[in-house]
Image: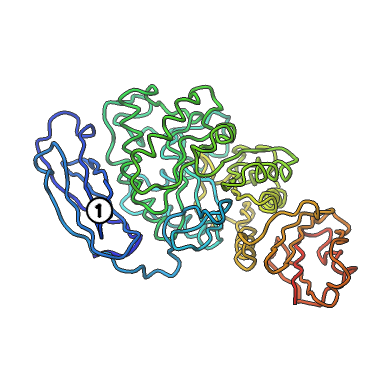
Amino acid sequence: MTTQWEVNDIVFKAKGVKGNPFDHEAEATVSMNGETKKLPLFYNGNDEWVLRFSASKIGEYSYVIESAIPALSGKRGTIKASANQKPNRHGAVTLEAEDPQHFYYEDGTHYFNLAFECDWLFALDYGKGDLPKTKKLLDLLEKNGLNQVVMNVYSHDVEWKKDSRLADHPEHEYGGRQDIFPFMGSNEKPDHSTLNPAFFQHLDKVLAEMHDREIVSHLMIYVWNKRVAWPDMNTPEDNRYFDYVVKRYQAFPNIIWDVSKEALYYGRATEEYISERVSRIRDLDSYDRLVSVHDFGFCSRNPDKVDFLSTQDWTHTLYQKMLDANNKFKNKPVFNIEHGGYEESPYHVFPGAYTNAEVCLRRNYMCLFAGVYTTYYWQGTSWNAVIHDPFDQPAGVYKPHFDYFAHMSEFFRRHSFEQFKPHPWQNTNGYNLTNKKDGTVLMYMPKENYAVTLHFLDKENQKTATMQWFNTLTGEYTEVRDFVKGEAERSPWSGKADAILIVKKK
């Protein structure tokens, strides 16, 4: 017995399999009310084969296994799925034809994609029985409204010079470990001929903890600039790894696929290779999870191959660049996966272009007010240095501003992001989002502005509208008052905090 969107492992034993067990095929035909899908089984080591299953619909499912392995072939059974009982569980992230520029869950609830980069999440508790560090960090993300982790299946180490202070705190350094590797052997001495079940068993637990908290894994299958000893492209070893990841994790409703971080940036992969990998996911993934590629050039040249466009843009003119992308691709969401804002941390890891917490926050709002989704980076967790318990560090040690994103998430729950559209012709000296259904106007005002011009709000609003201000740093709201144009143009936090003016019809 299971419930909707719960992940279930049905384990079978098959001893004496000849050859490389990772190369053997086993497939279950799963049926319910005349609908069928083919689900791959995967080898889990120790003579175990796993059928991993999650149900999006209520009912009784039957399955039968087909395989050249006699101990598996013909195995059959039933699985009963009852209604979801978790109020905050809504199914996999999908797209809606009626509103193609936004993300939705399977049950129709909007998914406000507010991501957080943590490339080494797989490594925090590797080799341990429990996951205390992983749980601690995921609890913080959940508490602060960060509902997606942009992460690698595996990274080895960074190529840039490391902060010398990390040597004094090895508990925060996860790069360069030889005991963690998805293949047998080690990154230094790889054996690409077979895979490491223990690595993936640990990653299972990480993704399960994320699923328990309704946090999406934006899972990048490759990364080219983290010193990974990958097998050569398009070899049996390469395909075995790639296919195994897709087979093993497709049943998790909280999966979004990404072929590779910065897929074409480092000269290793070709566009043809990345395109083939996308097609390979489509062929293998029976659940049709969303697919993207961390490369805006690839996405913009091949929009029909991806479900949403991922973009990386460090420019000072970020708002305009995101607005241009949003206007160009009207039939898909746009996701800014990296905007050059990497909030400072106790370690100098990778500063990018912007490190001040308020500036980084503003760049996230610039994306949102351009109508695209966004990602928060903190240098203390995004790469090899991972401080899983930042708020438990000693006094005087820099603490990240996760709270800024808790306020952001709450704001766009209260003012449903999917209902608003950018109105750049009404930006004046701020940024405008407008809800055409109910007439609500949101005006983002940087703290350096003396005022924001509201000439587009006519005199009638003084009798028919209310105004309220929101502080992006504290989450504070002013009282709701009748709209008065002159007063509405000045933020109560001018010079202190970026703010959002909310003008609503009465």
Q: How many marks?
A: 1
Tell me the quarter of the image containing the N terminus.
Answer: bottom left
Disc 1: which residue: 9
The chosen color scheme is rainbow
Q: Position of residue 303 (x, y in %)?
A: 54, 37
Q: Position of residue 125 (x, y in %)?
A: 38, 48
Does residue 179 lie above or below 503 as drawn?
above
The answer to whether 266 appears left or right of 342 in the picture is: left
Identity of the residue drawn at 59% across and 32% down: 297
Does residue 501 lie above or below 70 as drawn?
below
The answer to whether 456 appears left or right of 381 in the picture is: right
Identity of the residue drawn at 50% across and 26% down: 271
Tell me the quarter of the image containing the C terminus.
Answer: bottom right
Q: Is 235 or 137 nearer to us in this picture?
A: 235
The answer to whether 438 appears left or right of 229 in the picture is: right
Q: Kindly give the residue lying farthest to the front in the view shown.
A: 34
Q: Is 453 or 11 nearer to us in this picture?
A: 453
Q: Quadrant of residue 186?
A: top left
Identity of the residue drawn at 69% across and 50% down: 370
Identity of the residue drawn at 55% across and 56% down: 98
The answer to whether 386 appears left or right of 434 in the picture is: left
Q: Position of residue 306 (x, y in %)?
A: 50, 40
Q: What amino acid does circle 1 point to?
A: Asp
Q: Secondary structure at mark 1?
A: strand
Does residue 470 lie above or below 176 as drawn?
below
Q: Position of residue 246 (x, y in %)?
A: 35, 41
